[in-house]
Image: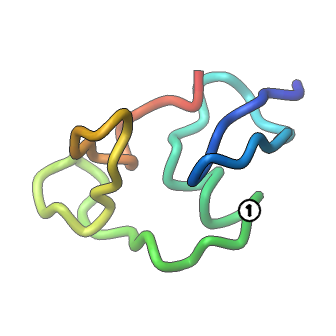
Amino acid sequence: MTTHVSINGKDQAVQADPQTPLLWVLRDELGMTGTKFGCGMALCGACTVHMDGAPIRSCVTPIS
């Protein structure tokens, strides 16, 4: 399924299931490997990114 996301002000189309965690879309689909996988349970903060100015844990946030 094609999903459209805005990353750093640039619209991007990605092929991902709507339930795919944002972390894996950023890393695998967009090649943005600065976002790291840590615990996978939103506890360690390694996957933290900003969404609408607020920090979120991308390992548990679905792309939808």
Residue 3 lies, in percent from the top left, at 79, 27
The coloring applied to the image is: rainbow
Apparent side of residue 2 relative to residue 44 in the rendered image (left or right): right
The single residue placed furthest to the front in the displayed view is: 9
- The one nearer the camera, 18 or 4, is 4
Q: Is residue 6 above or below residue 23?
A: above
- The one nearer the camera, 21 or 4, is 4
Identify the image quadrant of residue 4.
top right
Residue 62 lies, in percent from the top left, at 50, 29
Looking at the image, which residue is at 23% across and 39% down? 54
Q: Is residue 24 above or below residue 62?
A: below
The single residue placed furthest to the bottom in the displayed view is: 34
Apparent side of residue 20 relative to residue 46 in the rendered image (left or right): right
- The one nearer the camera, 45 or 50, is 50
Q: Split into 4 quadrants, where in the image is the C terminus?
A: top right
Q: Secondary structure at mark 1?
A: loop
Looking at the image, which residue is at 85% across and 39% down? 13
Provide the residue designation for mark 1. Answer: 30
Identify the image quadrant of residue 29.
bottom right
Apparent side of residue 53 relative to residue 59 in the rendered image (left or right): left
Q: Is residue 3 above or below residue 30?
A: above
Binning the other alpha carbons within 10 Å of mark 1 as few (below 14), some (14 to 19) or many (20 upward) gives few
Apparent side of residue 49 relative to residue 18 in the rendered image (left or right): left
Total number of numbered labels? 1
Q: Split into 4 quadrants, where in the image is the N terminus?
A: top right
Q: Amino acid at mark 1?
A: Leu
Residue 21 lies, in percent from the top left, at 51, 40
The single residue placed furthest to the left in the displayed view is: 43
Looking at the image, which residue is at 33% across and 48% down? 50
